[in-house]
Amino acid sequence: MDKKQTLYSILDLALVSKDHSLKQTYNNALELAQQAESFGYTRYWLAEHHNSANIASSATSVLIGYVAQGTKTLRIGSGGIMLPNHSPLIVAEQFGTLGSLYPNRIDLGLGRAPGTDRETAQAIRSDFMEAAHSFPNELDKIQTYFSTGNATSRVRATVAEGVEVPIYILGSSTDSAHLAAKKGLPYAFASHFATTHLWNALDIYRKEFKPSSVLQKPYVIAGVNIIIADTDEEAQRLSTSLIRMIVGIFTGKRDFVQPAIDMTDELKEIMQNPQVHQMLKYSFIGSKATVKAQVKAFMDQTQADELIAVTNIYDIKDRIRSYKLFAEIMKELN
């Protein structure tokens, strides 16, 4: 029997580094995607976040179009569109349009979290909580708008009907696992930060999975933080930007991605803080050899069909280098 190939992809938040403009940030996202295409990555997803000065992927579908325009074969998509922020009709129209412009290259990953704070969620959509609770129904609406069977309906997303845009359910808890299984849709779990529910969610998804017209058996994508450099020490140095970013999240002082500094005792101590330690559980940092062993163990444990890597590094050259080395690891493990 052939050994299962594990696909590898990228999740990008279009993080804004200190002293970088938004234009530079978007150009870097495109450059990363172009390089990823040549490294053999399957997909490049952009996340939706709002009211965060250090995250530039707020207008996610616009940015997806920009990156798709500058690439040729890479799948470009949302990891994810936070559905309760939007009208399902508008999402179907946006992604139907993208799917026609870039045929067989657009993915629609959908999540139910707001991707922001409570006040901003309220400003985006006053009935946000209601929409979050009716996530399964909102998902049904999107599927309906994409179906050719909706052509006789009074309300149509005409630009989406019959357009090939696969839907993925995103999750960081077990709720989404039940839904993805019930709908027979592929499931992407945010194990790059939501580490506590990973095993439970995968177990639920696989046990409850019902085959559908789009998927015959469960399909799991798992998120991992990856920082690879030529030596363990250099990778640790690059990881100081990520650690300081996480401190910012915990202290409510979010800031631009800071340049890397030499690893300090204080930062090492922060890494051992129970909350931080738990959050970074599936963060693989080191030389190629070090990370390869960690990734192999994670793949063996999760049996994921695909890994989606998040690499939060200050400098674009170091980021691209890390993603290049990760691609080499995946090719060797496959």
Image (cartoon, helix red, strand yellow):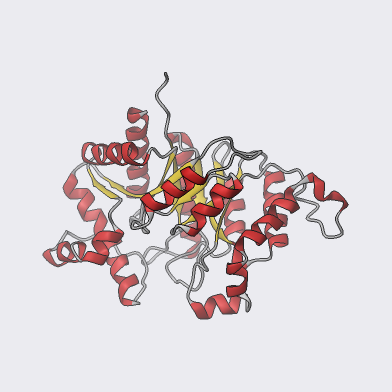
From the viewer's perspective, is residue 272 above or below residue 325? below
Residue at the limit of the structure toward the left, as seen here? 265
Which corner quadrant holds the C terminus?
top left
110 or 71: nearer the viewer: 110
Q: Position of residue 201 (x, y in %)?
A: 43, 52
Q: Looking at the image, which residue is at 58% across and 45% down?
A: 185
Q: Work out whether residue 46 can be spotted.
A: no
Q: In the image, is 241 to the left or to the right of 47?
A: left
Q: Position of residue 171 (x, y in %)?
A: 48, 56
Q: Position of residue 318 (x, y in %)?
A: 32, 48
Q: Work out whether residue 255 can be spotted.
A: yes
Which corner quadrant holds the N terminus?
top left
From the viewer's perspective, is residue 198 above or below residue 137? above
Residue at the limit of the structure toward the front, as seen here? 207
Q: Looking at the image, which residue is at 73% across and 49% down?
A: 146
Q: In the image, is 219 to the left or to the right of 3?
A: right
Q: In the image, is 189 to the left or to the right of 312?
A: right
Q: Looking at the image, which residue is at 44% across and 46% down?
A: 10
300 or 37: nearer the viewer: 300
60 or 123: nearer the viewer: 123
Q: In the image, is 23 to the left or to the right of 160?
A: left
Q: Position of residue 89 (x, y in %)?
A: 73, 60
From the viewer's perspective, is residue 125 above or below residue 151? below
Give the mark count.
Answer: 0
Q: Looking at the image, which residue is at 74% across and 52% down?
A: 144
